[in-house]
Amino acid sequence: MGERLGRVLAGERLPPAEYVGRRVDGTPVSLEISSIRTEVDGRPAVLAFGRDVDERKRIQAELLQADRMATVGTLAAGVAHEINNPLTYVLFNLQRVRQRLLDGGADADLREMVDVALQGADRVKVIVKDLLAFARSETADVAAVDVVATLRSALKLADNALRHRARVETSFENVPAVRAASARLGQVFLNLLVNAAQAFDRDSTTDNLVRVSVRGAPEDRVVIEIADNGRGIDEEHVARVFEPFFTTKAAGNGTGLGLAITRAIVDSFGGHIALESRTDEGTTVRVWLPVATRRDVLEARRPELPSEVPDMARARLVVVDDEPLVGRSLRRALQDRHDVELHTDPRQALRRLLADAEPDAVICDIVMPDLTGIDLYERVRAERPGLASRFVFITGGTFTPRASEFVASTDRPVVRKPIDLGELGRAIAACVGLRRG
């Protein structure tokens, strides 16, 4: 500071500098100091102006964090897409191998090895699903959701994790419905409840306590609070708990995605989430959600699919996927019940569909190089509109804005990779039923 004063008194013009000062109550404050040379009673002096920049720094930090989250989200979506394609054919083929081993009465050790491989693939499937939940820009349809009923359901699901570790106290006010998607909101509550159950170093239903409450809040909001008196979180970690891949859990016990996904879901509803914690005192998480309006009661955008795959006559299917191993595995899985024509070149598939092909259903990947599934569909809809209603889309992840917007707006079924054959079968049955009904 003394050097700066000397330079200003010497007539040097200096840019503003930042210093840390103290408020009247002793709390630190960041000050941006601007100084100019002047005179007081004929003697040289320095006139300094101080501006509190704490709020500006906070906003800058939030913008930087938002930019980092967006970058990580884009990366996560791309990684998930690249994993889901090979994971699709790994799962398909492992399931078929397992069935053949069972049918052939194979050695028990060999069956166990295949079962372990399937369990590992299923674990990868869950991790990739979490990545997509964090990264996905399209959101589930929102509606008027009974927040208390959803929270009670989550408490039942978390009961096994909670009941042997802590007492649970609840306090639910009579609050209006909130703007959310019920299943995803349930995922938020379940994540927070399981985190609370894991906050204790030892099991004790006498000393350990988890408090769950719901109450009204200003500005047409409802606040949900989940608090525990567990070990708490170190102060230096609190600011990072919502960062993707950051975890305070021991190695192997967490992916660091739970709270990042939770925040992404809450944000998608127009809500807000905050966490407070003190070491050895516990943690409190609050979720604010907007009260639902009449416009939140939305109609389903896509035809409702039956809960089971109905019996149907053998159908003619065209499968379009640029990944040869995915396409061949899909054809192998479907050809026992249907006639399947496979195309791994989307342009070749387009020529076939624009010519004289009359499939009962077209199973088409969305994200493909050179010609996307969206472009293929638009060309078919323009030149052979009768085929447009027979499309079923499959995707390993929609990591481009155009693909996200298409999935959010299309009235055609969308089945995500790794593909559930039951879900795909129901989508095919719906197409065939519409065509032949």
Image (cartoon, helix red, strand yellow):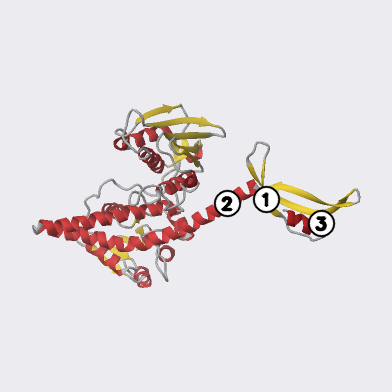
Residue annotated with mark 1: 19
Residue annotated with mark 3: 9
Mark 3: give few (<14), some (14-19) or many (20+) Cα within 10 Å. some
Q: Residue 10 falls in which quadrant of the image?
A: bottom right
Horizontal placement of 186 versus 36: left or right?
Answer: left
Q: Separation of disc 1 and disc 3 at Cα?
A: 19 Å
Where 130 falls versus 154 (above or below)? below
Contact, mark 1 vs mark 3 (Cβ under 8 Å): no
Q: Nearer the viewer, residue 248 or 393?
A: 248
Which of the two labelled residues, at mark 2 and mark 3, occupies the earlier sequence position? 3
Q: Residue 397 falls in which quadrant of the image?
A: bottom left
Residue annotated with mark 2: 61
Horizontal placement of 47 versus 51: left or right?
Answer: right
What amino acid is labelled 2 in the image? Ala
Residue beneath the point at 51% across and 43% down:
270
Asked if residue 144 can be seen in this view, the reply is yes
Q: Position of residue 173 (x, y in %)?
A: 46, 26
What amino acid is labelled 3 in the image? Leu
Q: Separation of disc 2 and disc 1 at Cα?
A: 18 Å
Q: Nearer the viewer, residue 402 or 52?
A: 52
Mark 1: give few (<14), some (14-19) or many (20+) Cα within 10 Å. few
Q: Position of residue 82 (x, y in %)?
A: 37, 63
